[in-house]
Amino acid sequence: MGLAETLLSALPDNPLAGLRRADALWQAYREGQIPCPTVITESSEPLGETEWDVVICGGTLGLLMGCALVRRGWRVALLERGILQGRDQEWNISRRELAVLVNRHLLSPAELEGAIASEYNPARIAFHGGTELWVRDVLNVGVSPRQLLETLKAKFLAAGGELFEQTGFEAATVHPDGVAVQAGDGFKTRLLLDAMGHFSPISQQARGGQKPDAVCMVVGTCAQGFPHNQTGDLFASITPIENQCQYFWEAFPARDGRTTYLFTYLDAHPSRPSLEQLFDEYFRLLPQYQGVALEALNIGRSLYGFFPCYRQSPLQPKWSRILPIGDSSGGQSPLSFGGFGAMLRHLPRLTDGIHQALATDQLHRSALALLQPYQPNISVTWLFQRAMSVGVNQTVPPDQINQLLSAVFADMAALGDPVLKPFLQDVVQFPALAQAMLRTSVVHPRVVLQIIPQVGLGTLAGWLWHYANLGLYAGLNQIGQLQKRFGGISRWPWSKSLPPPWSYRISRWLDAWKYGSGGDYEREDQGE
């Protein structure tokens, strides 16, 4: 009996059974037996009158979009397979990222404060045998999902939205003028938003059983009994490469204990470890990582999952009138395994874009595709993900990944917070990346050269293409600054002569340049 089986079987709510269900799915992904349901069909017959402007499937992160759209006056139905309530485990994020909820008038400052369960400073970045850095105000706020969703649910209902709990999505038929959604008693809507997450049946059908290009595996617990410590770890390693994996750690003070995660980046090769095996490694190494015996800990809950990543992301709409959002779209970088931060970051862009699409009836497939644009600042991170993973049959020096990360983060820290902090919040910008890469190439040329055989020339060539586009988008984003300076497209002298489809397209191009270059990080949202 392994450590994971021994320790998890003693916890309430049978987390071991849930872990093994997740492992069965992970095994299917490794063996190429990925579910590919047929839940979307198309019909050439008109649907007729619709009762909803938007139906959102998936309540947890879909509630954020539901609140934003119902405030704009749209008829919104939110479908949730179970009961819409957040988990006990906190979401870690920064106050800067949370500000969008107040700036977009979804929460008052007092309501936001009420959803914050914990806060700490500073946080550490450390690598085995190398650099140790400390930063402030990054992932240092723990939000209570339960409290946040309860508050947003009340606001959503008060604004006229309708919530349908215990109403799981089953299938949908796309008509020329709407979508017939099979769920509960049925729904007729102009637009269907898929917020059902990484394993959404709609996204699975759209990807056609495609195997992920990379996976992030995560296991962890929230427990009491640790030595008192009000600091966190953003990114830490305590071992060299083991089992063809480089293990990384995160740790955060929480309201009811301390949360610790072990995660690793890898591919979906059949020989990769199971989640239960990774949990065995977590419990084996946790005493060394946190300086505490397992017997001293009172484990409150466990956490586990695997997060598939695809190079062809964000997922382009395959049908008219259906748009994936959040994790369903794969819109976050392959370095991130938390969809909450990515959802908040793109909330203004998606809210404004969906609102304009509904207002101008730009709901066909090509128009919705503009809401899922190519983003070079996400695409460049694939090289970083590849540099932190090891192929099953690769021979890599045990400390190579630690040495690379130690050098890169030391150089980013030397260049200051404008270079380091956006990267830690999953935002890559051309000037910061250029400075960091130049400094690392000059100061640590041997480390840079060593990584080329590991990632391969093809990966490096692809990265150079995305890197060039990142610079191009940074330049094009200056057009977006003109838009801001003149009060938006609607105030440009020639804008009134534009047909609505062109106004919509230009707005989406400006958004693509801004977000694709990381330019959205430069400002706080000013609301609506």
Image: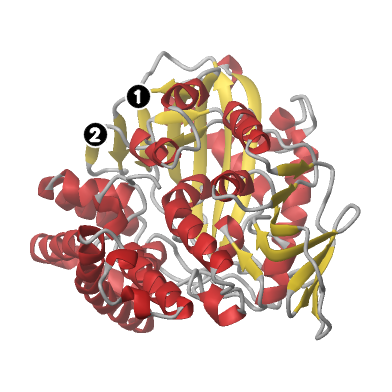
Left or right: 200 in relation to 404: right
Residue type highlighted by circle 2: Trp
The residue at the point 56 percent across, 52 percent down is 217
Which residue is at the front of the view, 509 or 274? 509
Asked if residue 436 shows in the view, the reply is: yes
Circles 1, 2 touching at the beta carbon (< 8 Å): yes
Label 1 Cα neighbours within 10 Å, binned few <14 / some 14-19 / many ≥20 = some
Q: Is residue 96 above or below residue 393?
A: above
Q: Splitting the image into 4 quarters, where does residue 458 fall?
A: bottom left
Query: Taking the image as drawn, is residue 31 in sight?
Result: no
What residue is shown at x 33% (from left), y 46% (from top)? 525
Q: Quadrant of residue 196?
A: bottom right
Residue 429 percent across, percent down from the top left: 25, 61
Q: Which residue is mark 1?
A: 231
Residue at left offset 25%, top offset 35%: 135
Identify whether 224 is placed above or below 5: above
What residue is disc 2 on?
134
